[in-house]
């Protein structure tokens, strides 16, 4: 059985020596940068930078899988913008009755690079940080436990769904449904999986929240922690650089 | 310590009340077994004492539950959790789901209670030890078997040291050895003065452990008396409960008259059947 | 006798070098067999192998004479039905009737036929009045019975019950016991993994004790439960009546109340 977390222990700077909040800050900065960097080369550079960070964290392989999962979104961006972008003028490619325009494609490229940067940045956080560490770090800094719990729950949705999917497929197989083998079999097995998958994710939520109450989750006031907070060295300059560079880019965009 | 007066409760989507006209007084240090078929109202009774009814569930309620002389309806759940602990039927749902190891999971409630780290470690060690799961303290809670999970669930509540402990079928996933171990823990807790309410189908275990048994059937209390009186009651099967197999064996051999005190444990049955044999021969 | 399922020298490891099963050999023929052992003895792994959800690391399993490696798990489902220990891992439809019809439809029955089978299976498990409900609105014990109905509706030749007695009340236990007896009367091969010794003693005609991935004992209840040594090795406790009979020094091993009462009367109370 899998742990409902995409986090995997590894010995890299991002896994071991960067604290969860700095990683969260890094992701936030990359998100902001992705939105404010105006030019195509800039967006390209940013996407490359983020992917480079994933490479350094030795998580590029798993991140590519996540990105591949979003391929449908990216393709649809290209289709819609290429065909219907409002400033479309120059025809780049004619496929039957459909014309793809240069302006739309270049706009789509920019949006896609933004999306890739954001997904890659998110993956960097999720793949290198134990949800517990992140949650505890937030609560220690005064974030309400309820909010932190929701954040952790969101981080766990994908792995939990993957786990449930495996279970449901096993159950379907045990009842005579073919789920393995050729691509078409797998595809046909995918649709009957969706409803139970979504249903099962909502089931037991009530009992779970009941259990949290019974264990004093909504008690107000101070909290203590079973684990002592790990000490991370040299994170202050990293945070300064992150905030500084993002502020710099913002100023350049606003006043430059 | 716990007092229920004319307590009737109907879940908002149900046609008939889950509990009806419940009158009940539980004194400190009692260990009470709750018997009845599925749907008889055992779990609902636990929810009512815990305060999950009315604070968590919507429905129609009349009558009153008091814990330590405080009306449960007027206290909030967080405050209730300092006095009453409840182990849910489905152990997997008892987990917070945010912790990466068993020991951290067990400490979750203590963190909420703001217990100092030093004491927290002592209590977690104690709970791990008493449930015999110290060996899996570093394991991920999601990788445990049903039996291990059930012990972690019990430990996660026990560690809060509640005065009142409610357990809803705490051994359903355990093998006989594991069940025996959990009951040893319960006997130990009884000695420490903790009040225990135990919903359970395993009558043999209740017969050994409890000071008092309550039988629920369709939301009403059918019997509330000593284990001997309840398990020897001729109407027991009508309430959806079977007597321990020892009692049945004794009844089949001796055919006792109504009102006779029947044996309910192995040891008692051996003794009584030996006596019966001697009397028969002599 | 026709041996539907044959396990030959099977070993299995989830991780290399950590054998959960060790060269285990056993055959299952029509009738009701209980497989007993401690948590972690390898019971559930054995069942998943029988079902084709796992494949042996070494040795082979034959179903109806054919090696399971040649079947997919979906094909095996026509012959061997498995009722999961945790119903929530088995149930995936939003109405009870749909859930129970799923299997029959998958193995190629017409909707009308599938519905007829499903309704019969629901009736057999006291579930007729909840056929339209969402399984997750029902109790855990009811969901366990839905899991059983969903396999019965497929009418396989062999049925594996993984811990069917968990969370059942007296009525539920009797129902499940009755169903096993009926399946046996129909000539089916029934295998039950159990923790409940009383239930095993009452409803099963053959007891298999498993420990550390191997078979320790295999025989009728009166024989297996009488041997303290085997029971100790398997980490299980004899049913209450066996222990009572031993303490009273009865010469026979009895596993039902009627048998016990009969034995006690003839051995202890005979006029002499």
Image (spheres, coloured by chain):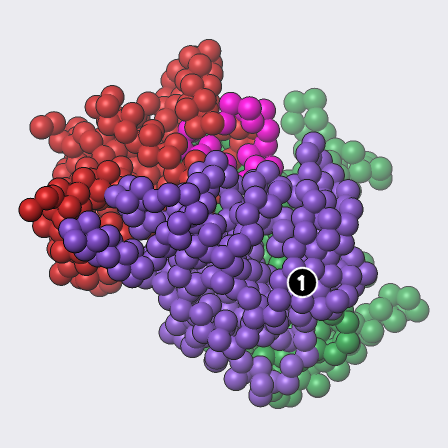
Chain colours: A green, B purple, C red
Q: Give the range drawn in magenta.
A: C127-150
Image location of residue C105, percent across then percent down: 43, 20
Q: Name the residue located 65 percent from the left edge and 27 percent from the top edge.
A: A95
| Tag 1 residue | B2
User: Dividing the picture into quarters, in which one does residue B135 lie?
Assistant: bottom left
What secondary structure do most residues of the magenta stretch adopt? helix
In this orientation, which residue lies closer to the viewer: A237 or C207?
C207
Q: Name the residue located 47 percent from the left edge and 27 percent from the top edge.
A: C126
Position of B41 compared to B67: left or right?
left
In this orientation, which residue lies closer to the viewer: A78 or C86?
C86
For the image, the number of numbered tags is 1
Chain identity of mark 1? B
In the rendered image, which quarter contains the N terminus of chain C?
Answer: top left
Position of B26 compared to B173: left or right?
right
SS under mark 1: strand
In this orientation, which residue lies closer to the viewer: B73 or A141?
B73
Image location of residue A147, percent across then percent down: 74, 63
Q: Name the residue located 77 percent from the left edge and 42 percent from the top edge.
A: B60
Position of A90 compared to A200: left or right?
right
User: Dividing the picture into quarters, in which one does residue A131 lie?
Assistant: bottom right
With respect to residue C213, does B259 lie above or below?
Answer: above
Image location of residue B247, percent across then percent down: 34, 49
The question of residue B80 being in magenta is answered with no
With respect to residue A27, does C103 lie above or below?
Answer: above
Q: Can residue C104 be seen in this view?
A: yes
Q: Name the residue located 25 percent from the left edge and 21 percent from the top edge.
A: C186
Image location of residue B80, percent across then percent down: 71, 66
In this orientation, which residue lies closer to the viewer: A59 or B48?
B48
The question of residue C147 being in magenta is answered with yes
Q: Can residue C165 be seen in this view?
A: no
């Amino acid at each position: 059985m899998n742990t409902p977390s995409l986090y995997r222990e590894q010995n890299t700077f991002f896994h071991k020596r960067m604290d969860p909040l700095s990683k969260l800050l890094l992701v936030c900065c990359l998100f902001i940068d992705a939105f404010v960097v105006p030019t195509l080369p800039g967006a390209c550079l940013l996407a490359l930078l983020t992917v480079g960070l994933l490479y350094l964290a030795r998580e590029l392989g798993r991140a590519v899988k996540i990105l591949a999962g979003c391929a449908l979104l990216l393709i649809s961006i290209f289709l819609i913008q290429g065909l219907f972008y409002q400033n479309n003028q120059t025809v780049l490619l004619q496929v039957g009755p459909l014309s793809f325009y240069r302006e739309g494609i270049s706009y789509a490229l920019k949006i896609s690079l933004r999306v890739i940067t954001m997904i890659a940045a998110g993956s960097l956080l999720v793949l290198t940080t134990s949800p517990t560490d992140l949650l505890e770090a937030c609560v220690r800094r005064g974030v309400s436990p309820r909010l932190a719990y929701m954040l952790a729950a969101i981080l766990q949705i994908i792995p939990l769904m993957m786990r449930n999917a495996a279970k449901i497929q096993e159950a379907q197989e045990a009842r005579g449904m073919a789920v393995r083998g050729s691509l078409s079999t797998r595809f046909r097995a995918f649709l009957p999986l969706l409803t139970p998958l979504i249903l099962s994710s909502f089931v037991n939520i009530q009992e779970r929240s009941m259990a949290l109450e019974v264990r004093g989750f909504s008690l107000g006031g101070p909290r203590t922690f079973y684990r002592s907070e790990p000490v991370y060295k040299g994170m202050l300059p990293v945070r300064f650089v992150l905030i500084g560079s993002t502020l710099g880019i913002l100023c350049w965009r606003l006043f430059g | 310590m716990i007092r229920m007066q004319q307590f009737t409760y109907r879940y908002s989507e149900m046609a008939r009340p889950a509990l009806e006209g419940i009158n009940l007084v539980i004194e400190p240090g009692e260990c009470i077994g709750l018997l009845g078929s599925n749907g008889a109202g055992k779990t609902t009774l636990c929810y009512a004492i815990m305060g999950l009814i009315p604070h968590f569930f919507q429905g129609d309620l009349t009558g009153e539950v008091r814990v330590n002389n405080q009306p449960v309806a007027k206290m909030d759940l967080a405050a209730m959790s300092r006095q009453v602990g409840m182990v849910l039927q489905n152990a997997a749902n008892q987990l917070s789901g945010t912790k990466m190891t068993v020991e951290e999971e067990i400490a979750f409630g203590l963190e909420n209670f703001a217990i100092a780290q030093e004491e927290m470690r002592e209590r977690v060690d104690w709970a791990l030890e008493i449930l015999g799961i110290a060996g899996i303290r570093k394991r991920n809670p999601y990788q445990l078997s049903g039996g291990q999970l059930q012990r972690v669930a019990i430990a996660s509540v026990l560690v809060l040291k509640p005065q009142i402990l409610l357990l809803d079928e705490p051994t359903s996933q355990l093998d006989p050895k594991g069940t025996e171990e959990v009951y040893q823990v319960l006997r130990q807790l009884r000695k420490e003065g903790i009040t225990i309410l135990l919903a359970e189908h395993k009558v043999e275990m209740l017969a050994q452990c409890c000071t008092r048994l309550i039988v629920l059937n369709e939301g009403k209390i059918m019997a509330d008396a000593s284990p001997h009186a309840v398990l020897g009651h001729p109407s027991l099967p009508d309430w959806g409960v079977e007597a321990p197999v020892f009692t049945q064996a004794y009844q089949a051999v001796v055919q006792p008259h109504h009102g006779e005190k029947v044996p309910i444990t192995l040891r008692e049955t051996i003794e009584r059947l030996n006596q019966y044999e001697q009397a028969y021969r002599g | 006798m026709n041996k539907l399922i044959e396990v030959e020298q099977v070993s299995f490891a989830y991780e290399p070098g950590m054998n959960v099963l060790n060269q285990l050999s056993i055959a299952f023929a029509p009738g009701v067999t209980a497989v007993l052992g401690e948590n972690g003895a390898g019971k559930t792994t054995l069942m998943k192998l029988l079902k084709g959800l796992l494949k042996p690391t070494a040795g082979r399993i034959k179903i109806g004479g054919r090696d399971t490696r040649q079947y997919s798990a979906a094909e095996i489902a026509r012959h061997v039905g498995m009722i999961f220990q945790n119903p929530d891992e088995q149930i995936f439809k939003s109405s009870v009737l749909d859930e129970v019809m799923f299997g029959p439809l998958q193995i190629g029955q017409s909707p009308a036929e599938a519905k007829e089978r499903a309704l019969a299976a629901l009736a057999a498990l006291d579930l007729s009045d909840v056929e339209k409900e969402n399984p997750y609105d029902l109790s855990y014990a009811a969901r366990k019975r839905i899991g059983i109905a969903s396999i019965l509706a497929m009418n396989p030749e062999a049925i594996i019950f993984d811990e069917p007695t968990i969370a059942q009340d007296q009525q539920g236990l009797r129902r499940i016991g009755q169903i096993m007896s009926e399946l046996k009367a129909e000539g089916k091969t029934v295998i039950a993994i159990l923790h409940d010794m009383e239930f095993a003693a009452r409803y099963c005609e053959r007891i298999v004790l498993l420990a550390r991935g191997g078979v320790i004992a295999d025989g009728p209840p009166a024989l297996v439960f009488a041997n303290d040594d085997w029971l100790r090795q398997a980490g299980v406790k004899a049913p209450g009546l066996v222990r009572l009979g031993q303490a009273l020094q009865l010469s026979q091993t009895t596993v039902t109340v009627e048998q016990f009462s009969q034995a006690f009367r003839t051995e202890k109370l005979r006029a002499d």
